Image: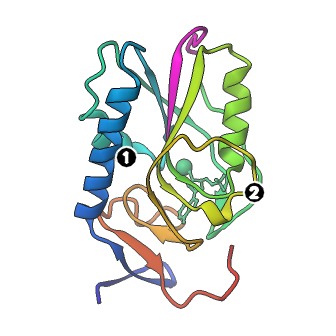
Amino acid sequence: MKKIKLHDKEFRLLLEASVIDSAIQELAQKLNRDLEGEKPLFLSVLNGSFMFTSDLIKQITVPGTEICFIKIASYAGTCSTGKVRELIGFNKNIEGRTIVILEDMIDSGNSMAYLLDLLAARHPKKIVVATMFYKPKALVCKIPVDYYALSLENDFVVGRGLDYDDLGRNLPDLYILDDQPANHA
Ligand code: IMP
Ligand code: MG
């Protein structure tokens, strides 16, 4: 069993890179079909989404596709604080645009709920949510999760852009926290 150590914690392999790659490929194909004629503006939520964005966007073939990056944060350690900080340096005019938010992970949904409110106030034509990973059992905010590549149990994971206190983002596979207490979320 493939294991790694980040800071004080051990993680074991959960998903091989190839599994994630295939799921992202399928997601890209769906988006290509559904966004036809939309000139979509993809909004990648940093830091965690950098790898997902890069993997997905190479496979998006919709004419008029644009990408920009925004930054928010809601995590400290392995448990969501439920607090989201402000949106950093985003001044693009999105009025009348079709927005596709790209997230690495939807967990409680707090960050996404916050982001959706902020963006809705800028009058886009529509907002679509696409996430690489989704933990349906962890969701506490009522938000639309329009597209996801893979759904996960309510466990803490690293790799593929996701970190544990800044480590692990570079890993191409996904790892799960080993030896978790029963109710860690
Ligand atoms: P939410 O606001 O609780 O939905 O959390 C969203 C953000 O928390 C994600 O975009 C991730 O950056 C981070 N996050 C959520 N779950 C995990 C995890 O299992 N590992 C690492 N980061 C996570
Ligand atoms: Mg994130």
Kindly identify which residue carries mark 2.
140
Answer whether residue 95 is magenta in the image: yes
Residue 170 in the image: above or below residue 123: below
* Residue drawn at (40%, 59%) of the image: 169
Residue 72 x %, y %: 62, 41
Asked whether 114 falls inside the magenta stretch, the response is no
Magenta stretch, residue numbers: 90-102
**Image quadrant occupied by the C terminus:** bottom right
Residue 138 x/y as whole percent: 67, 64
Q: Nearer the viewer, residue 93 or 60?
A: 60
Amino acid type, residue under disc 2 in the picture: Val
Q: Nearer the viewer, mark 2 or mark 1?
A: 2
Q: Which mark is residue 52?
A: 1
* Secondary structure under the numbered disc 2 in the rendered image: loop
**Residue drawn at 58 percent across, 44 percent down:** 145
| Image mark count | 2
Q: Quadrant of residue 16?
A: bottom left
Residue 138 vs residue 44: left or right? Answer: right
